[in-house]
Amino acid sequence: KPEMEMEVFEKYESNVRSYSRSFPTVFKKAKGYKVWDVNEKEYIDFFAGAGTLNYGHNNDKMKKLLIEYLEEDLITHSLDMATVARGKFLEQFNEVILKPRNLDYKVMFPGPTGTNTVESALKIARKVTGRETVISFTNAFHGMTIGSLSVTGNSFKRHGAGIPLSHTVSMPYDDYFSSNRSIEYIERFLEDSGSGVALPAAIILETVQGEGGINAASYEWLRDIERLCRRFDILLIVDDVQAGCGRTGTFFSFEPAGIKPDIVCLSKSIGGYGLPMAITLIKSEHDIWEPAEHNGTFRGNNLAFIAASEALTYWENKDFSNGIQEKSEMVSSFIDHVIEEYKELKGEKRGRGLMQGIASEIEGLSEQICNEAFNRGLLMETSGPNSEVFKFLPPLIIDKEGLEKGFAIVEESVQTVLN
Ligand code: PMP
């Protein structure tokens, strides 16, 4: 009974930790890019589990394999032990992803979440270099454990730790200044490292900052950062938890920049079906941990390995990435249209690929637009330090019709909010 479900929601979902209340309904069913609540109201999903459902909800191909796997009583939980499903994933990842891109990384399973891969990256970078500090960026988001939070550039979230977080230095991200001063600033800082400022172990970055406001770094900036890392012998960590797995058009978001990070963090859509999974890619020379020097119980989710292997087959076909490109252009033109047509929005276009957004200068407006969109059957989220951006983050498998339906709702919501 939908009324009963709503009653349970009102009774148990906290008023204080009220995130669930920003989508005030009880969700029940989902397929592809559509979601339904207990009242059978349909929603288009422009949220995709914050980048976790790149291949859509309840992907048919993955579902079939998962059901078969369960029916045969094959192993589901295996800590860090070798299993057939894990082996298949490792082989597939090497053959479909790493080899064609000429990348030579060791794959490590750090634990089930994005935070876990970031945490492992920070640890290994410190262990490899023997240095303490890590450079991160303004508006970065890397996770919620003390280590990953310490490189997160969001003061509200940092306050959640209850103590000041140390051993990190926040630097201006690419768009922080209007000129190239970010690189000059960082370079100068590193050059001064002999005079009392400790040389960092690593620089950690997102190529497109998801939670921090859909800020896309230029390829040139990324290459400059890599150059500084090489010059000062600092490890480059790319956190591709949200921007990776095709979100920006290529499997790794950094591919078009032509850089080769020392460590890459992947999670969210690597698990394919929304199943918790993360991997840390480490250049062989930095792969120095002894067995169990970093471990965790949930590193062997074989259901995730099954879905993840199947997800990688999308990358065997160029049409998939070309399709992302075409849909990205649709989003981009729609955003241009909205900004041009509704000047009162004072909107600015952000991002790339299927990770784009509109930042409104007017306080609270983006949030109102998301609320209106929800009422009309579209799931969207805001991001940025003041929730000033409303994001277009649909599953990558969305079709043109789905995008257009979503756009129509966005446009109506913008009109309503501005009236
Ligand atoms: N890094 C980035 C770039 C993210 O966007 C997120 C999650 N939004 C994380 C790390 C943390 O991932 P998780 O929530 O799975 O721990």
Image (tube, helix red, strand yellow):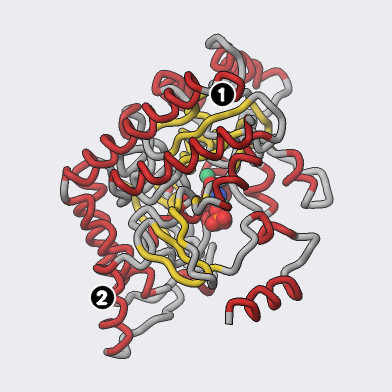
Q: Residue at x 46, y 48 (%)?
A: 46
Name the side, left or right, on which 210 lies relative to 243.
Answer: right
Marks 1 and 2, how far apart in space? 44 Å
Give the label on residue 338, or none. none
For ligand 1, tell me if the residue under mark 2 lies within 8 Å.
no
Residue at the top extreme, as displayed: 179
Disc 1 residue type (three-letter): Gly
Disc 2 residue type (three-letter): Leu
Q: Position of residue 177 (x, y in %)?
A: 61, 14
Q: Position of residue 329 (x, y in %)?
A: 32, 31
**Residue identifier under label 1:** 347
Give the label on residue 65, or none. 2
Q: Position of residue 121 (x, y in %)?
A: 52, 48
Can residue 151 be seen at all in this image of the molecule? yes
Q: Quadrant of residue 310?
A: bottom left
Name the side, left or right, on which 371 lies relative to 411.
Answer: right
